[in-house]
Amino acid sequence: MKVRTSYAELRNLLQGLSFCVKYCCKRNHLQTIHLYSKIRPKKSHILDCSGNTCTHRTVPPGSILLWRFFSCKQEGTKIPSKRKQNTAITTSELLYKNLLKSEQENWNDISARYKDMTERIKEKLEELHNKYMFNSESPRIRFGENVYFEENGCIFLSKAHDDEGNIDILFSTEDLGFSDAFIQRIRISPDQRYMAIGLKSENSEEAICVIMKLGHFPVMEKVIPSVFSFEWATNDVLYYTSQKNLKCQNVFMTTFTNQKHTKLVYTEQDARFFVDIYCTKDRRFLTINSNSKTTSEVWLVDCRQPFKLPALVQARTKGVIYHVEHRNDELYILTTYGEPAEYKLMKAPVASSGMENWQLVYALEKKTKLVDLEMFSDHCVMFLKIAGHLYLNVVSFVSHSVQSIKLPTWACEFELESHPEHTTSTCYFQLTSPVHPPKRFAYSFKGNNLIEQAVQEVPIITNCHTTRLLAKSKDETSVPITVFHNMNSKELHRKPLLVHVYGAYGIDFNMGFKEEKLMLIEEGWVLAYCHVRGGGELGLSWHKDGCQRNKLKGLHDLKACIMLLHELGFSQPKYTALAAASAGGVLAGALCNTDPELIRAMVLQAPFVDVLNTMMKTHLPLTIEEQEEWGNPLADEKCMKYIKSYCPYQNIKTQCYPSVFITAYENDQRIPLTGVLRYVQKLRKAALDHASRTSKKVTASFIVPGNWSPNIILDIRANGSHCDSSWEDSLQEVARHLAFLNKELEEVCHFQHHSKSCK
């Protein structure tokens, strides 16, 4: 799910080959998100929802969803009379179509002003992409003498010691009639006779699973529609979950023996829970994981007896999240059970796995974010964030010791590589930041030391300074900020500042490398990431302190962060822009209502800006499960009033707003497009009303202060969806956002490719 062409993009696709534990993706509780940027790689697609693209899954707090997950159904008013109801629905659809047409026409009228600059920015971004990322080698996953890798929609097989470069093509999306889909996930059967491939189109939330029978001439054996996750239990038994209307609640087993058959093995009855499947790294068990945002339950399928009924590990207990790995006839359980309510690594015998038998192995310190966890035969590697710094903690199951290593200060993000064999003696990973391309490291279990791999051909950026700050929020809570700026920049108070915010679902920013972030740094911008409450940067409690009736704390945090940045001389309000995506639109939109004077412009991508109306619509498929994040306004009047107090749409008023550029998607099933349309219409009217009230005479040479009217722009994309866009579309989106910001802040924004001087 990362938005880059580094090793990480394919790691998740191929981790079915490695059978590794990838908690930040598979376990759903340690996820990250990319805000504002969606540039996707040309060579390969985002895979499996790790890093910051999303395929839907319900995840517990401290991680939760990558994006806002509401469906985009039409909302007709319910009226008892059937005739009246049909009329109301028709009227609603007509209004929606008229609004959509109006906004599309408006965009067509104004898009020309950004066209030339957008093209210049695209050229610059492609140049940076080719320089830093394009030549990155696809990861090679080795099983014995076989090496698998994916490029350009094809899956290849080569031999480990073949110096002649002989390569077999096992699968091609184009040749088999799936040219409009990208490869999302791969799972190879233990004996490598079968390959299961998850394919997803850019305009659909549902994926299909294609089963290939491998050999000298690979043959497409079966196509299973509407599949979310899948794993091989044995050489010829596949378990998979079906997805319908953004929900995943059924688990099936299908066989590829002489007597082929498919049967239902598990059904989740609670609409708040989402089901997926995972294979333990030693391939001993499949785990059927049923998770809500606060509670989880796991069932085990014995891979040695795949037809036996699944066995319950521990019955769901409200507020307790747990995920399971296996080693030496013991279950290793990552859980929030016990005090404090942060993640702990515990263990229990397989035969008596109940909570009463859980024994503590390792507990995280307070305000520590568990980013990722990887199990090996004798070690467990934990990737942690503490106060913005990255740490590698290695737990030895042999010596019962823990080694903690602080990683380089410039690093902001981990990229764990695939490890096919859990008996390996080395753990490989990459470090990166928004302005630093990935750099490879290794930890040796034998030497108990960290090894920096050979210097890459592309040099690491050295002229960017990374600063970590703490802002005091309204209640005196310290809120972390990560700031990047060019070390050669002078007069930072006159430089443009781009502030990023999210603050929902317990997700922290994905601070991986982005070409556009590097470009902005080179052009003199200051970048700031505000790690407000509601996100997961400081652990589970950080999320809990910013959700439901604590949501306003995130808003107070954001305001405090921006004010501190200005106080310390990082730009000033008239040169400041705010960027947010999906649920980040809640806090960004709320700030525009309460403190519009703090920023000059804002860019939003598929923003969630109509919280109250959306949470009142129980017919939307994800409303019920989202109540654990936002509350239930239908059942609780106080909750309704609280949501109304911060909901961006509900609090628009006649005042001077910053300029706003919003990108939305016609095929977005998670953010109701009707809500975005209503928000834009209401915001534009409020801004125009204020401008008309405060307008003064305009001379031929200048505009009298107070007459400035913001640009409120909505770009509705026909292609792409909330989670997936093509390389070309995503590049275009980012370039348009930057062109918009450059226009709005042109007094100080001077891109090197811009031929005109700043005003």
Image (cartoon, rainbow, N blue to C red):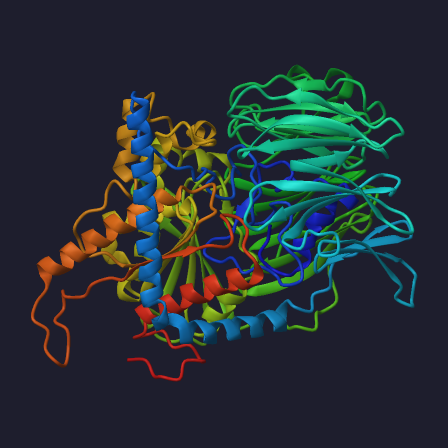
671 on left or right of 45: left
Image coordinates of residue 528 in percent, x first then y, are 42, 59
> Which quadrant, please, contains the C terminus?
bottom left
Image coordinates of residue 43 in percent, x first then y, are 67, 62
Residue that lies at the very extreme toward the front in this rendered image = 83
> Residue 639: in sight, yes or no?
no
746 on left or right of 28: left
Q: Is residue 266 above or below residue 471?
A: above
237 on left or right of 81: right
Q: Is residue 681 above or below residue 345?
A: below
Say which quarter of the image contains residue 79.
top left
Image coordinates of residue 462 in percent, x first then y, are 56, 72
Q: Is residue 673 above or below residue 307?
A: below
523 on left or right of 309: left
Residue at 79%, 56% in the rendered image: 140
Image coordinates of residue 375 in percent, x first then y, are 74, 39
Residue at 54%, 25% in the rendered image: 295
Residue that lies at the very extreme toward the left in this rendered image = 697
Residue in front for this viewpoint, 329 or 263: 263
